[in-house]
Amino acid sequence: MDRWDPIELTSTFRPILEPLETIQTTQDQVGLYDGRLKAEDYPSGTVYLTGYRILYIDAKDPARKSIGLSLRLIQGIQHYGGFISSSPKITLDLYPRSTIVDPQSSSDLISTQGQQTLDNSFSGLAIKNEPSWVCAICYNSNQGGIQKCTICGVKRPIGESVANTPTTPAADPFLLNEPNYMDHPFGNAPQNAASNGGPDPTMAEATTGIACPACTFQNDPFMIQCEICGTELQDADSIAFMLHRQQQHQRSIRQLPSTINNGAISTSLPSTTAQGGNNSPSKSLGGSKLFSGFYGLSSGSSPSSGKSTSNDEANNSVKLSFRAGGIGHFHTLLKAAVAAKAWESKLKPKPLETSNSSSSDLTSTGPATPQIKIGGISNILRTVETNKKVTDETLSQAFQDLNGLMEKAAEMVTLAETISNRLAKSSSVDKEESATFKTYLLSMGIAAPVTKDTAGAVFHKELARELVEFILPIVEREGGTMSLMDIYCVFNRARGVELISPKDLHTACQLFPDLNLPLRLRKFDSGLLVIQTLARYSDDEVSTAVWKRIQGLPPGAGLTAIELASAVQISVALAQEQLLMTEARGRICRDESVEGIRFYDNLFTNWEL
Amino acid sequence: MSLSAASSNAAQGLSQSPALASGFQFPSIHNFPPFYTLQPTASTWKNQADLWGTVVMRYFRHHRLYQLDLDDANTTNEQLFHNQRINRRLKPETIQAIVDEMVKKGDAEWDPTSRKRKAIILWRKPEEWATFISTWVFESGLNNTIMTYYEIAHGDNAEDQEFYNIHPTVLQKTMDVLVKRGVATTFQGANFEEMGVKFFNAGA
């Protein structure tokens, strides 16, 4: 899991995207696998595929368990269709770490790197402490930590998992060995070597060999996997302990006084490996060279590590398990996104800026090359002209057809922002015009709207989140309540061409409580649907305000919904609703006539005859 | 009564209507437009219906009226339920609802045969009428003689009494009260007006 990075989220737990990053698709109920094993911290969440990253947002704890994997790390993609009760999965082979970090760069780096990879390898190993088991259905030998058969997905029998756990003296060998090591740092090496070299069973028992739980072969105590069948032998604690001890040892070597020169180290190195008690070649931890063994463990650069798949897979591959379907779509888009390499173009500056800044270059490369060095007013004029031309071209291209507009959407937004900035600076334009323009800008608010294509099964949830992000400031400005109809208009205008249906909006709004969003859909008795901010403006406050307004009217005058709506800048339907609510509280009364309903202060309450 | 009402309601900004030709003056709430709309809020409606009940009772008492007929386009309905100054009129169903409220309080009674089109407004309870009539009978020395209902309601002797021209239904109710009190006994007649009544001696 170390390849994943924490990501930033919005208040509604949607990912914050980088500039120009767009969500390609979304899928919920996806679990992560670290190598072949389930990553227990990331059991089920929503996975977003963007142009640059794969983002995982946990369903239960989105604030802390949300991580992203850069697409640039992906080397290959494997698709697994699922079998019986095993969910379909996508395996992502990652580029080995060594291609990113060069372990040979410096000794300082080695030490820190060693520390890091050590931790990583702990996390990778932490779940591999149980013996393998054989699936009752398909007879596939599965690794210990896996609770479902990797081939057919059938669950591991519960009784078996307990019964088969061997009583291997896992931690003991180290406890026994440690005093030896402390007392005779170099001296007990041959003894160990002798004991391991000859697989004498009595000797092995006496000197704490480990019996393989699968094939009963007596392995050397420092082996992680059985030499014969490759079954995991030791529990994580003992391995961690061993790694720690080895690391300590390395440190002690490095910290030797300067009297010991390179030669001394080179002599001591074999002794450490001998101390490690490792006579088994080519296993990741027990390589004849301890250093390379370390890096083989984490980076996968060692050729021998290709076989010891468990550790490398943990670091160099990631699985996404699609428990609620949607894998086909995701797979296709993921392949496309990896192939598109959107991140490579990301480093370029924004298109419009490019065109503006390079405008002089443009002309210079054009036919009018000799004019490059002309300065003064003519050059300024020419630059202005070129700028205008580029802008015009962008505009005309953008509005040629809808697809063109979608492609140019980002540029158009940038352009609009530039214009608004210019408007703000220039005093010649009167305020009304710039205000109008600003409302247009507001309407262009959503650059990458959530669509059914990109969100798939979680469309409504995503829509609800996007809606809250977009509409919350507007609702607050409108006094805490907006009718659903108004929101539909504003929202769809902002979405541009990706219009949504009223039903989608309604469904999304009904999800507000489930998603813990700060807005609520409310249905008034009359059937009017409104969106309200959460408990900000209570009915009491609203009705008191309406009542006060009516009391403040000249004597004998009433108030209609239309008058109220225009007075406080809300929709008529909402004004009507507020009046009815106030009336229901007995504060005002109505007068129905051919002119419509007028509301008056409730004189009946305290009238004395 | 109108003086105190005017003082407490003066701030509401409702103008006072001029008195009718009969001398009756509507309270200023009669000029309040919502007064003519059945209020959907229960508590508001209760207050409104109470106010209407009081206004109707006052009007009927002032004009010595007994029967309210929704189908009758007489001056009563026009004056009481139609305010031409503010161009508002009570709908018949609203009037029914108001009378229903009055019936609940014992201030009115539907004519059972009229399907809620006619009602008797009891601006004075039958018990009160019984007291009035028995007092009048004893004071006039008419006890121990048989009188017809007509004599009580329209007789020359009763011309200056409050129960003059009393509605037959109200009179019958009053007589029922008197019989129950043991003050009088009734005799069947050919029609209602020929029904007889005999008051016993006082204290009998």
Image (spheres, coloured by chain):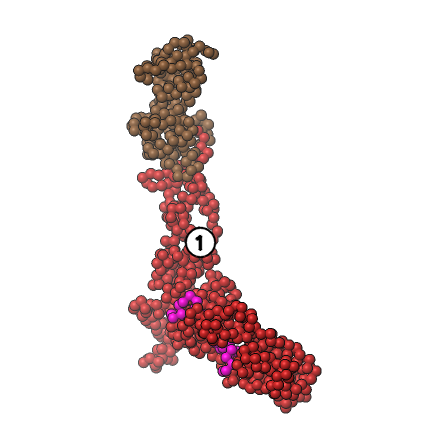
Q: On the image, which quarter does residue A600 sit in?
A: top left
Q: Position of residue A130 (x, y in %)?
A: 55, 73
Q: Looking at this view, is B148 or A387 the one in front?
A: B148
Residue bearing the label numbered 1: A520
Q: Which chain is disc 1 placed on? A: A
The hue of chain A in the figure is: red
At 53% from the left and 72% from the top, the residue drawn is A145
Q: Looking at this view, is A387 or A275 the one in front?
A: A275
Chain ID for brown: B
Describe the element under mark 1 as helix, strand or loop.
strand
At 37% from the left and 43% from the top, the residue drawn is A560
Q: Looking at this view, is A376 or A551 the one in front?
A: A551
Task: Find the magenta span and give its range.
Answer: A306-329
Q: Position of residue A161 (x, y in %)?
A: 54, 70
**Residue A83 drawn in magenta:** no
**Residue A328 drawn in magenta:** yes
**Label 1 environment density (alpha carbons within 10 Å; few <14, some 14–19, many ≥20):** many
